[in-house]
Image (spheres, rainbow, N blue to C red):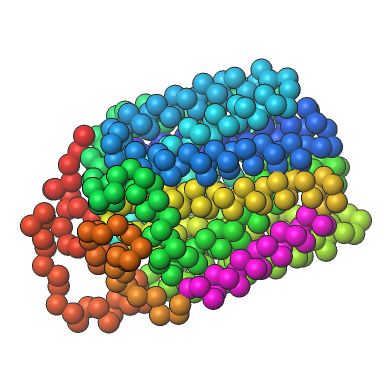
Amino acid sequence: MLTVLRDRTYRHLFTAQVIALVGTGLATVALSLLAHDLAGADASAVLGTALAVKMVAYVGVAPVVGALAGRLPRRTLLVSMDLTRAAVALALPFVSQVWQVYVLVFVLQCASAAFTPAFQATIPLVLPAERDYTRALSLSRLAYDLESLLSPALAAALLSVMSYNWLFAGTTAGFLASGALVVSVLLPTPVPASAERAGGVFAKVSSGTRLFLATPRLRALLPLDLAVAAGGAMVTVNTVVLVRDHLGRAVGDVSLALGAYGAGSLTAALVLPRLLERVSDRALMLPAAFATAGLLTVLALGTAVAPGPWAWPALLVAWALLGTAASVVLTPSGRLLRRSATDADLPAVFAARFSLSHGCWLLTYPLAGWLAAGAGMPVAATALAVVALAAAVTALALWPRTDPARTGRPGSELPAGGPCVTLPATSAEAPARRSAPPTAPTAAGRTPGRGPARSGAPRG
């Protein structure tokens, strides 16, 4: 897995991602404690609303930025968004009203909505070989797990010697370091998208979404994201209330519980690269969605009874298993996107997925927070379990068992003139494809459906 770090550009980008996410993890813990200070027992409602504001920014901003990403210097865009996020994180310790939290969270997440899809769409161009890209996806999942595992542990250590307000300073430092690492490399020049040539910016804004609706595997990815959001919202929004109020444990145990979720996700991400060489994406992702529904059901039953000595270890195990299931769904998802779009359309497709998936979180975050605060934790867990189960069943119905390795650009739904996508085979399909004659490279020096050749990828 670590062999992809030999590529200097990817190594710097990955390091930037890790540092920024560790800082974000510190902010997650600090924001939970800030909400608890401002709202007390209503912290779940405050967090649910703040995270809903975050999702509004993601859903509204990401498609627009995806449409404009090809027109902007990629490095300038990424660094500007890092600087914006650093400035907002620096201001968070000084808030004294709940509405101020909402405003700053909105600005912060608008910057993240611009940064993340552009960053994700850059990686397939830096690592055009599918095996390398699969390993990069696992490493990216590991980076997110560091946010859930190492940064809460670091937060717990820091909270023993300082106020949680100082954690926001760590977030600021993380974003500044991320920007410096992005500046240190030359990034591939974005390829003009066919949608923009055919129909302008509006066509490009909507092309990623229409590609999702036209491709069976991507239609199934949307309910899978909803199942992950159901489990993740329960963890993110209600951990502080479960640990502090329901179980009556110390502040530091909030970080430990969040760390258990990260540990489960980390374990899955380490195993998945080898597993995906032998098992199809579908065979892994669908059972993980059903497992999420089952875990939330067990959680609803557990929170309905008086907590005993078993409750704390049971919560840690449940959070670890939810993290494992989330990683099994999220890690391979980039492979599905890459198989369903050309290099030119990757920014729009990643932006559409970013927006649509966070639309799922926009539903589950307030559902988790408002139901927990108004109706109780068992009701919140039950509702999220129903959402996860319905999503898993929908994904099962939408994703055909025989998912083709080749997907054309649907001319009836997407702008005319777009290229047909020749997609790399999955591991399960590879033996049948090996007997076929190799596809001749095009004049541009790349095989259809693959990324640009290393020697031909423009840098700038």
Q: Residue at x 15, y 58 (%)?
A: 446
Is 69 a magenta residue? no
Q: Is residue 126 left or right of residue 28?
A: left
* Furthest residue in direction top, as rendered: 94
Image x and y of residue 384, in percent: 71, 59
Image x and y of residue 451, in percent: 23, 55
Secondary structure mostly seen in the magenta stretch: helix
Can residue 2 be spotted in the picture? no
Nearer to me, 278 or 452: 452
Q: Which residues are magenta?
A: 378-399
Image x and y of residue 222, in percent: 52, 61
Q: Quadrant of residue 10?
A: top left
Q: Is residue 28 left or right of residue 212?
A: right
Is 395 a magenta residue? yes
* Furthest residue in direction right, as rendered: 306
Q: Residue at x 71, y 63 (%)?
A: 385
Q: Is residue 165 left or right of residue 69?
A: right
Nearer to me, 101 or 454: 101
Q: Residue at x 50, y 73 (%)?
A: 398
Image x and y of residue 187, in percent: 26, 38
Nearer to me, 89 or 48: 48
Q: Residue at x 78, y 27 (%)?
A: 38
